[in-house]
Amino acid sequence: DLARWRGSQGAPPLDAEVWLWDGHLHGADAEPLEVQAGVVHWPRKRRFAGDDRCFFADSLSMPVSSHGPWQLTLHPRGRHRECAVVQLAQLVAGVAPALWLGQLQVMGVPLPAPVAAPPQEALLSVTMQCCCHGFAGLPICIDGERAGETDEHGVFKLPPVTGSDPFGRRSCQLSFEGLPACVLPGWSKEFMMYAGIDGRQAHVHLPVACMIWVFYTPPDPCEDGDCDEGEEESSMMERGMVWVCADAKQVSEEALPLKGLIMFGGPDGCTVEMHGQSVGPFLFKSSQAISSRCLLADLQITPEPVEGFTYQARDPSPLAERQEELGGCEMQ
């Protein structure tokens, strides 16, 4: 539903209007799919994408707006590797079933004569959704070459776009090496960026999701029961550990899900329930325009004790200690 989708990764602000899109979905090998008022029209004779790839997923790799001032300025580069329908079905169990395909902005609107178009300096803004602060020092690559990094406010001045795509749109490749793909829109570190039909470039805003994985790892038992009395007592004294990470690649192979609550942002923050079916990701957004304190600094995990164990939280929290000592954003 719409409310759940607004709270998911890549969704617009809670007060944003929602419109249905008109355009075409162009795959590298599949024929284009026409989209009218948000409805995909399937051709009567579909040509397979080849290489056992999903026809629909291949078509999502290059969206093109058909008319109007709202034009595509950013979308993930490359093909979807998995079946898009399967991905949507799997999302139902977590957030609302929606995939981020691209970012639209008003571009190419002709100015009335004799008004000349003022020079526009296009900016890339990278912000954290946990505190709405800019991501400082993020390396930026354009067309495979290092172009610089974001300043202390998370802003980078974009150079003019000089390349073009198969449809004649002025475009370039934009990539980020300092972030895991899972926290970026479309779960991608590489994007295609476009200029308007009048040559002007729009500002690009890239939100970095505040997602965490929460899990526990049990103590290592004596292998095959082959341990003496002293080792057995030592094994019983070992503790299982509850872990928090911000990258799916950091989830341990021995990770097990928990039941309980995750609380962010102190008394006025938000709470998410863990059902013991998944280790994450769990997504959070700051409710403040600019928060002086990162949501992760006040993270509290209250799991239901696993059978045979009791839960003892570290006090003080290592995240709170880091915030007091270093400040800034924990996601960075």
Image: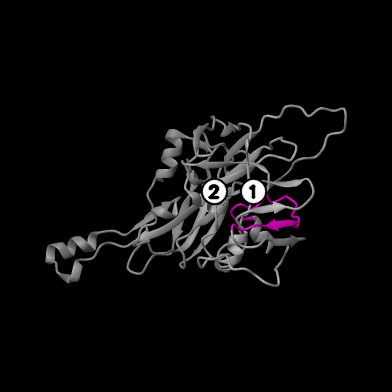
Instruction: Spot the residue most to the right.
Output: 113
Q: In this view, does 133 lie to the left or right of 12?
A: left
Q: How is the image coloured?
A: one colour
Q: What residue type is labelled 2?
A: Leu
Whichever of callouts 2 and 1 sits on the residue coming sooner in the sequence is 1
Give the residue displayed 50% in from the left and 41% down from the top: 176
Q: Which of 99 and 78 is in front in this view?
A: 78
Q: Main secondary structure of the magenta part?
A: loop
Label 1, secondary structure: give it.
loop
Q: How crowded is mark 2: few (under 14 residues within 10 Å), some or many (20 or more)?
A: many
Q: Is residue 103 left or right of residue 302?
A: right
Q: Which amino acid does label 1 sit on?
A: Pro
Q: In this view, does 112 lie to the left or right of 267?
A: right
Q: Is residue 205 magenta?
A: no
Residue 129 shows in the view: no
Give the residue displayed 88% in from the left and 30% down from the top: 113
Q: What residue is disc 2 on?
A: 184
Q: Nearer the viewer, residue 314 or 104?
A: 104
Q: Nearer the viewer, residue 182 or 308?
A: 182
Q: What stretch is highlighted in magenta?
A: 7-28
* Residue 232 location (% of width, % of height): 17, 65
Label 2, secondary structure: give it.
loop
| Residue 63 position by quadrant | bottom right
Q: How crowded is mark 1: few (under 14 residues within 10 Å), some or many (20 or more)?
A: few
* Residue 244 location (% of width, % of height): 42, 52
Give the residue displayed 87% in from the left and 33% down from the top: 112
In three-dimensional space, the C-alpha distance between marks 2 and 1, rounded to whole angstroms, equals: 26 Å
Residue 91 against residue 120 in the figure, above or below: below
Q: What residue is disc 1 on?
A: 166
* Residue 43 location (% of width, % of height): 70, 69
